[in-house]
Image (cartoon, grey):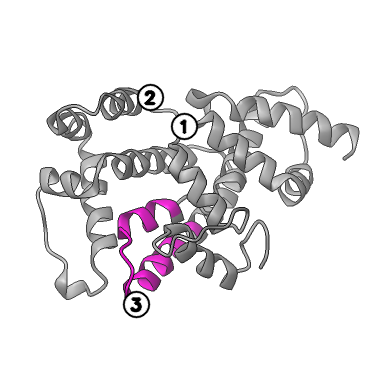
Amino acid sequence: MTDLEHQVFTQVRAIISNEEQVIGRRGILVPLKKAIIADGDIQNVIDIISSDPALSAHMLWRSNAAAFTDANSTRNRSLKDALIRLGQVNIYRYAFTFYLKERLDELPQPYKKLVRGYWDLTENIASDAVDSLHQMLGVDIDPDEVQTLALFSVFGEVIALTAFAYLNAESEESFPLSIIKSLIDNQKQTLTLEAFDSLGLDEELQDEFMIAHNLRQTNNSNSSGLVLRRVLSMKNQLLKPL
């Protein structure tokens, strides 16, 4: 690593550790996390989600997308029914990715275009992972767990590139894109795991992410990470190739 790459690496990691700067829109996520941690009345969670109509619509869409593969079999469900079915962990993961995507849409060019490419890849992976699950027999895996896990498939790349965009916006000197490309290529695992640790995501998500990327093994045949691993392998996206 060159001195300049090390300098950028250090500064990018510092930005990644700032949850509010990276994810934005704390007005919903903070009380949502508190309500989930409290493990109290689901109505509190419903009220928080309902306060943002765009998030509510997103939850309904995600719920139907994960539960059904045949468009003719999808059906509208109330927000309350959808949230009860999703479970609180999946609710927070979906909300987090919703506001992360919203934050990414605010990035200036060329970062917005580059991150959008990663996000399109993420959505494609999520769709393929859910389709793969529905084709499997004899497993008891929540499709929303597969989908929420898949939405973090290239999490490290997305967060690192976002942090680099903020760094260039705030710095007196402009760092070339080749630097962050080199860091993503060579420090992807470090950046990814630090992002998980810094951004307050649940431990089960990180554990299954490790399984999905072949960084950890499991004997659990009902692991959502194993479902995702097959898809990531086919798309050459594993942090540790098979």
Q: How many marks?
A: 3
Q: What residue type is disc 1 on? A: Ile
Residue linked to disc 1:
23
Q: CA distance from mark 1 to mark 2?
A: 8 Å
Q: Nearer the viewer, residue 101 or 193?
A: 193
Counting other residues with Cα less than 10 Å from the Cα at mark 1, is it few (<14), some (14-19), or many (20 or more)? many
Between 225 and 66, the one nearer to me in the picture = 225
Please give the name of the residue rendered at 56% of the width and 49% of the height, measured from the top-left corner.
115
Between disc 2 and disc 3, whose residue precedes?
2
**Element under disc 2:** helix
The residue identified by callout 2 is: 26
From mark 2 to mark 3, how far is it between C-alphas?
Answer: 38 Å
Any magenta on residue 146?
yes
Q: Position of residue 43 (x, y in %)?
A: 12, 31
- What's the residue type where badge 3 is placed? Gln
Residue marked by disc 3 = 135
Secondary structure of residue under mark 3: loop
Whether label 1 touches label 2, CB < 8 Å: yes
Label 2 neighbour load within 10 Å: few <14, some 14-19, many 20+? some
Write down the region rendered in magenta: 122-149
**Which image quarter is the C terminus in?**
bottom right
